[in-house]
Amino acid sequence: MVVDRRADFEASLTRTAELRGDQAGGALQRASLLRDAVHRFLKNRAAVAGAIAFLIMVVFVTITPWLSPHDPYAIDFGKAYLRPSWDHPFGTDDFGRDLFIRTALGGRVSILIGFAATVAIMLVGILYGSLSGFAGGALDNGMMRFLDALYGLPYLPFAILTLAIFGTVNFWTMVVALTVASWFTTARVMRGQIITLKENDYVRAANALGARWYRILFRHLLPNTLGVILIFVFLELPGVILGEAFLSFIGLGISAPKASWGTLAQEGYSSYLAYPYIIIIPSLCIGWLILSAFFVADGLRDALDPRSQEA
Amino acid sequence: MSEQMDGASRASTNGNEPLLVVKNLKKYFPIKGGAILDRTVDYVRAVDDVSFTVRAGETLGLVGESGSGKTTTGYCVLQLLKPTEGSVRFAGKELTTMSRGDMRAVRRDMQIVFQDPYASLNPRMTVGDIVSEPLLVHKIGNRKSRRSSAERLLEVVGFNPDFINRYPHEFSGGQRQRIGIARALALNPSLIVCDEPVSALDISIQAQILNLLKDLQNEFGLAYLFVAHDLAVVRTMSDRIAVMNSGKIVEEGPAERVYTNPTDPYTQALLAAVPIPNPRRMQERRAERRKHKDVLAEPV
Amino acid sequence: MALLEVEDLRTYFKTREGEVRAVDGVSFSLEHSKMLGIVGESGCGKSVTVLSIMGLVQTPGRVVGGSAVFQGRDLVQLKGRELEDVRGHEIGMIFQDPMTSLNPTLTIGTQLTETLRRHLGMNKDQARKRAVELLEEVHIPNAARRLDDYPHRYSGGMRQRVMIAIAISCNPKLLIADEPTTALDVTVQAGVLDLLHELRSIHEMGVIIITHDMGVVAETADDIIVMYAGQIVEQATALDLFDRPEHPYTEALLEALPQVEGEGIREGRLRSISGRPPDLLDPPPACRFAPRCAYAGQDDCATVPPDLREIRPGHWVRSSHPTSERAAAPVGAR
């Protein structure tokens, strides 16, 4: 019976379609959202410079360890505290290890921890935020009050506490500690996004169709937050890298002989009066990466925000 | 003609009951207040005791100004908002007490077209996905048949099906509105709530869409609950008119009668306020308006 | 001499895809105390036209040619401070959305007196006294008391009245109203339009009202300009335009309007204009309405651009097929 009705409807569709043809004409607007966004991004000099600087750093930390003739872990006190030279562009440290390759390796650690923690923060934040915003009502209220309570506490003690609970510092505990300390903002922003998007008529239309909740969440809500998520990746990344550097600097970092930029800076701290380059170089690297990521985030925000429409 | 029959058979009601019967519908929104805890201090009576009917194949125009509660009424009919009180009977079934699962099945028979053609289509879905989504949700046909249904639906609403893989932002407001109409039509509903479907469109495009809605009504025996603020647009579309003001229906009747011989003072004032595209009648219209000064007094 | 004389105004927007000719050779003049309606669909250039006159076009737009002579001065040539003095002082302006034009953090009184003190050099008491008078003039009840309210305490219609009060505060000779009632309900709209009419006579202002609503121009304007795709396609007195529309576009537009009064409205169909307005990046080479025109194709109007010509005294039209020259063919005129 139902099938019959559907068949009738389809048949009458065909009939009327033949009758009407297309009236509206098909001239398309040339706009492509993605192309426009890319164009806006490329027109933003600071953002492009940031992106290039970011890439240079990534390339540096990736390829230097392959090309460098020095062993990053070989201790040779005869070469300790060499000033920057052609052979050792960044000089050597108190154990005579080449700082050029150690900076690159430390950068690998810093950036990898940064990315891993950012991904984790995104996952936790998106899950918590979208669930809270999507559910609404009492659950949302409770989840947000919990977040408010966490917000009230300072950021670093959280990470330190987490590391203390683990009792050991390695790559993964560091990622967990940083995630625990900094997922709140993402969760909040995601909740706000979902709540705004929920008011869109296309979500209402999906409800009117009888679509189930998971379809609405995964098909209609989350895909439309991609732009914000992308911006947040580049906003969170510098914060996380700085957090890791700080923890390492106060001695809660990856332990020797491995190093991150934070540990390198901390090693340089003991002799910063005599050999300032040992602390300056990793600090500059951290600053370089953080600034470039911020410029990229800023450019992405301008490029993806439809309100900043500018041809 | 056979489509007309089809329309009647879809919405099989018991005896002579109209397709949609709304009785004493109320929708109150709480106003939260209080120093520490959210307490409900008062209610906004968005819809306050509204009753009307829509018969199969006819159009009821629901006209009112902003804040009159007309859109909220439309949402309550579709159960997109839960009514505070009252009854909504559709095709002989009470919707307000229905389970989610049963309601899902009823949704095949009642659809909605929105005002804003930019907000009503998901920007991350292609035109084809948008139009075939209703079929997917209700598990009708397979991928291939849904695709061909979408193409035919698009053709029916005057949208070139060659653009089925494009995204909505590539089209103008009028074309997007056609996509929204195709989506609403996909499940072969017997009632479509049109919520200000042309108020975002330019005049020449507005006429195209209104004509299209009329044609579809004739071809598929659709009933419309046509919600709008523009009295001229509502008149063009409606068999019967209900005028809403502050959550209540102040006047209801055949379109012809309401427009030529309005009895309620608010309806009279509303009609007097509409600018008429005829400069010769400017003075006469001004005088007419002055008569309704009290009703037309603006909120301060 | 006319109050405002606009001559061959051209405003182009530079975009990546090319140059958008938003206003492409617009000329008109406005006499003292007259109300001119500019009507057209979105994107026809009606708003950009007045923004160009006021020097308010923003990049990437630029007035690339033409002049707008107001009381002996070409506004297009004015810069910075000079232009600001003309704006707000000699020309008042109101916009579609009164909420975004008012600062929500300042009282209505502050915003009103600010203009008075700056442009007219009044002191605090004088300005306040004048502000109350102005609010009374736009019929805001309890004016003296409401002066100290913030904008959010005002309804939409009342806010628009405040905007009008600010616009007329320096006794401008010209008032420009860009879609002044589009955001308002129809019952409120009527009051605001009547107010504009009343103030026009009291202050002997010229008024330009821009709208997409044929009903609004019919009930307010003395003269009407119809714009399409950046050009004026028809210009006439209100009476003549509605009685005898000449341009096929105007004619079709009027027939596309849903009617409140009449017979057989429910059963009938509206006349629809097929297609949609052209892309101004690449407009049709000659008559811009030709691709949608029911009468095009009979001659060379798709290749030779028609001029804006005076088909009878005071009635200008840009078309090769004006209604009165089609009289031979039995066209179903209104």
Image (spheres, rainbow, N blue to C red):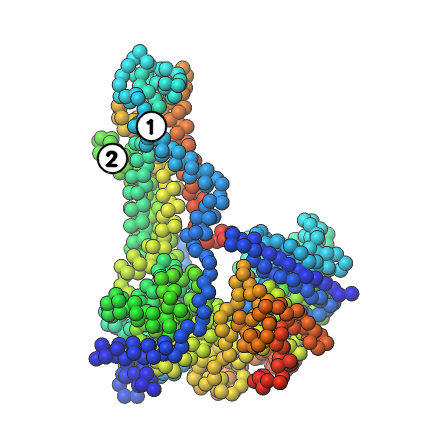
Same-subunit check for callouts 1 and 2: yes
Question: Residue at 60% of width from left, 64% of height from top?
Answer: C230
Where disc 1 sits, the SS reads: helix
In this image, C330 relative to A2: left or right? right
Could you say where residue C237 lies in the image, as x and y percent from the top left?
Answer: 68, 75
In this image, A222 relative to B269: left or right? left
Q: Which residue is mark 2?
A: A173
| The one of C99 and C53 positioned closer to us in this rendering | C53
| The one of B162 and A109 positioned closer to us in this rendering | B162
Q: Is residue B113 above or below residue A31?
A: below
Q: Quadrant of the C terminus of chain B?
A: bottom right
Name the chain under label 1.
A
Outermost residue on the right side: it is C1
Q: Which residue is mark 1?
A: A64
Could you say where residue B207 lies in the image, as x and y percent from the top left?
Answer: 49, 75
Q: Is residue C111 above or below residue C1?
A: above
User: Quick check: can you spot residue A226?
Assistant: yes
